[in-house]
Amino acid sequence: MSGQGAAWAEAFLEMMSVERAAAKNTLTAYARDLGDAAAFLAARGRDLADAAAEDVEAYFAALGARGLSPATAARRRAAVRQFYRFVLGEGWRKDDPVRRVEAPKKGRALPNVLSREEMNRLIAAAGAKDGAQGLRLGCMVELAYASGLRISELTGLTLAVLARDPAYLIVKGKGGKERLAPLNEASRAAVKAYLEVRPGFLPKGDKANPWLFPSRGKGGRLTPRRFAQLLDEAAADAGIDPARVSPHVLRHAFATHLLEGGADLRVVQTLLGHADIATTQIYTHVAGDRLREVVQNRHPLSKKR
């Protein structure tokens, strides 16, 4: 990306970071999305700064023809829309080239959820790996499932946060918002066992490494990608199709199993850190049988006269 459009994109990302406290992962995704749009426009002899409505329409149409997932295509369209809204607000352009392009209606996919029995098998398989590797992976799976942590939150935990065996974590989630994440006895026991072997994962000469899950890699801590790879191996060992398992699926399991157990939807919303309860409601589909039973047994009109 180059030219005036690149400068505008940089200003847009800075605004997202400072004014909206966008997470690093969000900023990275938006930068990638705008870069993709800029490359498409460059092939048409255009720049983000001077693109016409016809150019943006062509880009949006091309997204659908490239075989991208609906979620990825929708995010790229959203990034471009927000970018031009920002540009218009700054007065750098007098028109919005996206305004006449109707946003496609996007249905929300139901989350892939593991059953309780499958989660038990996955936890067992993770912990069954050899020695320290098993203690670390088992600890990560237990923490994610017990607390509903996002992968970035899990790999970003520091040693100081868990050194004193707390009953809950204070997690900084999307937008810098803090929330409480509970820890059950199983996850606390897994942390204690893992801490005994943690020194073996420290980079050479880095005893002051602050991360709960250190690594000898460049960043000094285990990456989300590496955790996902280890999780795939554990899934295969547990007899579960790895395609059904990802770090985020552990968060789905946390929410779904809480609702199945009778937790209030508002409580689950708070634990997940969702700003809008509509985001949390997607998990209620798997607890449908239980919800119907509650209505049948508790609603006044359902009682036998």
Image: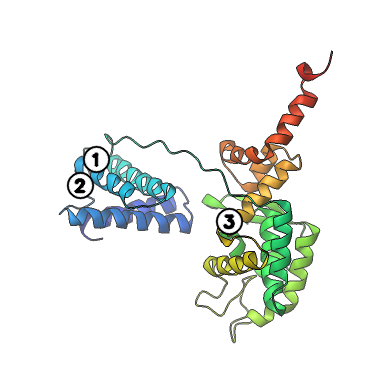
Quarter of the rendering containing residue 303:
top right
Asked if residue 136 is positioned above or below residue 59 in the image, the reply reads below
Is the residue under label 3 in contact with that under label 1 (CB below 8 Å)? no
Name which residue type carries label 3. Answer: Arg
Residue 155 percent location from the top left of the image: 59, 65
Residue at the left extreme? 45
Question: How many labels sit on residues?
Answer: 3
Residue at the right extreme? 305
> Would residue 258 be found to the left or right of residue 43 on screen?
right
Residue that appears at 33% across and 43% down: 81
Q: Nearer the viewer, mark 1 or mark 3?
A: 3
Residue that appears at 21% across and 49% down: 49
Q: Which residue is mark 1?
A: 97
Distance in Å between CA atoms under marks 2 and 1? 7 Å
Tell me the SS state at disc 3: helix
Distance in Å between CA atoms under marks 1 and 3? 39 Å
Task: Tell which circle, 1 or 3, labels the residue nearer the N-terminal end.
Answer: 1
Residue 51 percent location from the top left of the image: 20, 47
Mark 2 neighbour class, 10 Å CA radius: few under 14, some 14 to 19, many 20 or more: some
Q: Which residue is mark 2?
A: 51
Is the residue under label 1 in contact with that under label 2 (CB below 8 Å)? yes
Name which residue type carries label 2. Answer: Ala
Name which residue type carries label 1. Answer: Pro
Mark 3 neighbour class, 10 Å CA radius: few under 14, some 14 to 19, many 20 or more: few
Q: Which residue is mark 3?
A: 244
- Comparing 20 with 298, the one in front is 298
- Comparing 223 with 59, the one in front is 59
User: Is residue 229 in view from this perspective?
Assistant: yes
Tell me the SS state at disc 2: loop
Asked if residue 180 is positioned above or below residue 260 in the image, the reply reads below
User: Is residue 156 in view from this perspective?
Assistant: no
